[in-house]
Amino acid sequence: MTFINLGLAIAGAAAVTIPIIIHLLFRRRRKPVMWGAMRFLMEAYRKQRRRLTLEQMLLLAARCLVILLLAMALGRPVLERAGVLGAGSARTLYFLVDNSLASTALAGESSALDAHKDAAAKILASLGPSDRAGFIALGAPAQPVVTPASSNLAAVSDLIRDLEPTDGPADFVGAADALRAVLGSDDAEAPEGDQIVVLLSDFRTGSADTAAPLPPSLATIEGIQLFALAPTEETLGNVQIVSVDPLRPVVLTGSSGAGLGDQVSVRLRRTGSAIGESGVSSVRVTAVTPGAGLNDRIASAQAEVRWSPGQSEATASVALNMIDGEASAARQGASAISLIAEIDRDALGADNVFRRPLDIKSKLGVAIIDRRRFGAAPTVDRLSPGDWIRLALAPTDEAPIDILEIEPTAIDAPSLAGVACALAPRPDLITSDGWRRLRLFVDAGGMLVIFPPATTELHLWSDGFAENFGSDWRIAREATEHEQLRTLAKEQPRTPILNLISDELADLVRPVTISRTVAIEEAPAGTQELLLLDDGSPWAVAGAPDLADGETGRGLVVYVTSAPALDWTDLPAKPLMVPLMQELVRQGVGQAQGAWASVAGGRIATPSRTAQLEPVSLDALLDDAPSLVVDASGRTIDAIRKSGLFTARDERGASRGLVAVNADAGAGRTDVQAPGVVQRWLAGLSGGAGEVAWIDRDEDALAGFAATADESRNSPVSLPLLLAALVIALLETVMARYFSHAFQSAPASIGGQPA
């Protein structure tokens, strides 16, 4: 509602009295003057008195009605608001409130979410008693809080006021789908009147990813209007933790293990106005055990990152020393620890903390799928590929690797239980059921290393492998004999699996020669090339199996094109063999199992046989949080919208490891965006059929939003009322002409003279 229309309505209503006043003034009695002919005129007047009075009343009514219709036409929003014209009861507003990570950005003492709540309260206060309102929270996944709309505006206002922020992105697509289910579904009862959608967001890059077009979810809903708060112009700087990567993802604490003294890489990113500034960020990394408070930490260390103007990313290397006596006592019996990285507080707090679970094992279970050997140990020239692998994995009795032998024809779930890696030097002996079991093993986070069999001429085993692990894996059916011995390339790719020996790799690969290979003809997209031959062709590759929906799951498959036998390659007798197999298994297992770290904003995956996730008490915000139930697919039933650390437990209550949920770093980008870009992006919701109208952020605009929404859809003047006023004005003119008797016939004449 605007003041101009209100003034016109009041002035027009008052102007109706003008014709009445004029009429009354002309009825004033004057002093009578008697003259002779007056008697005849008075007699004629008395005969026509009733007709003249009726004519005057009709003219007065027409003149008053013309002015009243003009006032109603110009003051239409006022009348509709009052329900006089019937439009005030047909308006439904749906508030889409951004409570994503970016909405927690602090501008002074309050956050963007606080401003969104205040804006919603002012708009709700401007609505009439016949209006209705709904409410959808945008924090991923979008949450319909009040749908369909309710006439209890006070209750809707209270629910918006109690809205909590999330640590994930804004889900505009999910919110639009929820609106379509309410407003556009064939089964849903279509609400009457105008449908107004109000988007309350700062539209920073973290909330509104304008690079990803929005689907036209609302294009089929008729009469819908889109309003949004104008994008913020206030720049904010933010420093966030993107990832935490320990040098060894699996810690082996056996007597010859590496212990817990290792490097941790913490990757940071700056967004918004912080990029253009120089600065220093302090990085602190703490290791804690489940159920222990931060005061009972195993170890803690810190480092600094110095930023240059224009620098957006940096990596801090933090050295943790966790192998002293107190640390050993603190982690006695622990199967997992959590690394918690923290940086200095800034505009966004949730992405200043990152949790990374780390497995602790006294020994690593490794299975060798090969025929068992009985009797005395053979001489070096008669060692089988399985024997060479066994020697490389356990060169001494104190090696922290527990080797289990599995017959190729007897692969089953019990034999693979407790095993993190399986090596298959005889894949030709694996049955179709064995390949299926190995696929399940890999999908659960296991690692499978395959070598071509040394004694087979025709390699038909690759069919069973491709059938279970994807047709993208294509391996040659015959071995290639190299008349001239091949060598490994002097420059090898740097990969996470062989990262620890990458500096010495050039010296280690130099003496290795290769005489026979079974080439890999095709590998899935994203496969890592671990080692290359001198001609650039892959000699060892690693890749994750593809899932049915095209996504990549956990687990890892490694294929080496030469059998570890001396008539294929002299690698088993060279210094590269032991570090290669050690790093291939240790780092590969860590990559296959993953860290069970997810981002907030959806249902998360959990370790196998997990029944529920129990919040770890060191997170103060989660002290009173309930446990989360896990379904049969291994994912939480409910979406997790807040970051935290959880203990995965099976049905018996036994721990299955740690699961971390971190803030979505992409949702924490604080860059501002141009209104035109955001407007075109939001218009995609309606298929580009209509533009989004901006709402000013000042209090007067928010308080007057109800009239603003009306005027954006309709003209401030009612055309039907104007037409009615015109018709009445024409009718009044005709009546005035007729009642004046100006068109009556002239009296008859006699002899050309008036009678």
Image (tube, grey):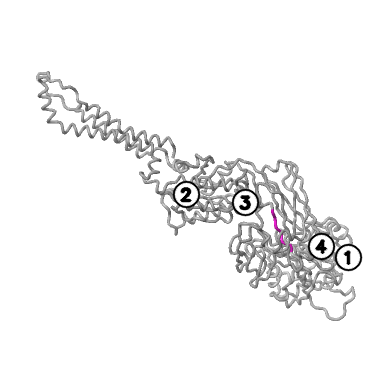
Observer-side mark, 3 or 4, equals 4
C-alpha distance separating marks 2 and 1: 74 Å
- Nearer to us of marks 2 and 1 is 2
Looking at marks 4 and 2 on the same chain, the residue that comes earlier in the sequence is marked by 2
Left or right side of 20 for 519: right
For the residue pair 496 and 469, the one nearer the viewer reads as 496
Label 3 neighbour load within 10 Å: few <14, some 14-19, many 20+: many
| Residue type at numbered disc 4 | Ile
Which region is colored magenta?
353-358
Q: Nearer the viewer, residue 417 or 513?
A: 417
Residue type of the residue flagged with mark 3: Leu
What whole-number distance in Å separates the C-alpha atoms at marks 3 and 2?
25 Å
Horizontal and vertical percent position of residue 755:
10, 21
Q: Earlier in the sequence, mark 3 or mark 2?
A: 2
Extreme-front residue of the structure: 295
Disc sitting over residue 101 in the figure: 3
Which dot, 4 or 1, sits closer to the camera?
4
Residue 323: mark in rendering: 4
On screen, residue 353 above or below 29: below
| Magenta stretch, main secondary structure class | strand
**Percent x, y for residue 359?**
74, 64
> Can the viewer see residue 413 in this picture?
yes
Local packing at callout 4 (Cα closer than 10 Å; few below 14, some 14-19, many 20+) is some
Q: Which residue is mark 1?
A: 574
Of callouts 4 and 1, the N-terminal one: 4
Which residue occupies 40% across, 40% down?
77
Residue 747: image tag:
none
Q: Quadrant of the N terminus?
A: top left
Tell me the mark number nearer the camera, choosing from 4 and 2. Answer: 4
Numbered label attached to residue 93? 2
Q: How dense is the environment of label 1, judged by Cα within 10 Å: few (below 14), some, or many (20 and up)?
A: some
